[in-house]
Amino acid sequence: MTEPFDHLLEKYARLVVRVGVNVQPGQEVVIGALPEQADAARAIAEEAYRVGASRVSIEYGDPHVTRAAVEHGPEEALGSVQEHQLVQARAWHETRPAMINLSGNPHPTLMDGLDPARLAKSAPIELIQELMPLTTTNKVAWTVVGAPTKGWADSVGVADLATLWDAVATSMRLDQADPVAAWQAHVAKLGARAAVLNGHRFDRIRYRGPGTDLTLGLTPQSRWVGGSVENAAGVEFVPNMPTEEVFVSPDWRRVEGHVQTSAPFFLASMGALVEDLALEISDGTITGATAARGEEAVRAQFELIPRSRHFGEVAIVDKDSAVATTGLVYKNMLFDENVGSHIAWGNGYTIGMDGSLDRTPEQRIDDGLNQSNTHVDIVIGSPEVQIDGIHADGSVVPVTRGDEFVLQD
């Protein structure tokens, strides 16, 4: 590690609290973490209190318990949620805490060998349905941030945990003289890029490259977003750290073609690494899926989670990505989605479609914004993949060439 761990952790916590969720004086803070991430969670909690948080709680989960339930538990109890968990989640709709979730699986192979159908059923859908509206409609300030663990470092293949922390520090711009200022400049750049895309008002976005020819339609209300957003109280926050993308919510009904992933990804809900995934899409629906690894897990999710066969996000990432400069495959969606342009099946975010915040989920679907209890990003970009914007009159405008954002006002 290039600097003392305590110093790095202090800078990390400062960035997460002051930029990631922008904790306000008197606000409650909720941190989701695994036991192996306790050092990072505690540092964030201390920093949150330092800036004036009224209360900080750390909600620890344990994937070993999930595995035990899937392997030995009764079928009817899989995915069941205790009433006190629902009561707490419902209370957050009123208290509006800043919500921080730590990412970085310490046991990436823990779910290997389990029945994919039982694993999919173990997802706490009722609790997810209570929690997702808090973040997908930006009622609260929230962020997902990487917190390295030894198991994660081993799965990436780096020398040790310290090496992974160094890579995460680079991805999060903690290696800059003033990380907060660096993030402010980065967020401004992404916001300007989104403004350029919005100025063109494209009708469709097309990805073309090896194994990929995919067109995703937009609605007149689709809006590109990048960097920071605002919650319902007008507080600016950064949902993902790191982030290198500008994204939009497409019209789920207007997706056609085929696509090949250009990077592996970890399907967290199924505990599966997926490699070389190829999808066929017709009339907005994924109709075929094959993969060199993880195919059964992908198919199980499509079968068991409603509306997971439709798309909810289109994102553009160019060669300036700090995550890509590390040269690692993180086997973690938060990081790996930021190495290249990507799309996501499942839930579409209201922030990416104007006017959808006050609509019901059923109305959003009718408007073209997909709603689902999953959101899975897959990288399909590379220097060989070209992205074009297509206007309603059929005119085509280059957006990226050779992994460089070339679109002008």
Image: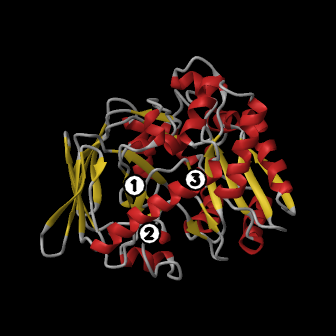
- Check the image and report above or below for 54 versus 144: below
Q: Locate residue 35, reporting x and y percent.
A: 76, 36
Q: Disc 2 to disc 3, how far (Cα)? A: 22 Å
Which residue bears the numbered disc 2?
Answer: 352
- Check the image and report above or below for 93 versus 71: below
Q: Extreme top residue here?
A: 159
Circle 3: residue type: Trp
Residue toward you, 302 or 393: 393
Task: Estimate how packed mark 3 is, as few (under 14), some (14 to 19) or many (20 or more) residues with alpha carbons within 10 Å.
Answer: many
* Label 1 SS: strand
Q: Locate residue 363, reporting x and y percent.
A: 44, 80
* Label 3 SS: helix
For the C terminus, the quadrant is bottom left
* Label 2 SS: helix
Residue at 55% across / 21% down in the picture? Answer: 158
Circle 1: residue type: Trp
Tell us which disc is closer to us: 2 or 3: 3
Tell us which disc is closer to us: 1 or 3: 3
Q: Quadrant for residue 337, please give it.
A: top left
Q: Decide if residue 409 is on the left or right side of residue 22.
A: left
Can I make out residue 117 in this image? no
Indicate which disc residue 345 carries.
Answer: 1
Q: Locate residue 263, reporting x and y percent.
A: 36, 36
Residue at 61% across / 54% down in the picture? Answer: 181
Q: Quadrant for residue 238, please give it.
A: bottom right
Q: Earlier in the sequence, mark 1 or mark 3?
A: 3
Q: Decide if residue 363 is on the left or right side of residue 143.
A: left
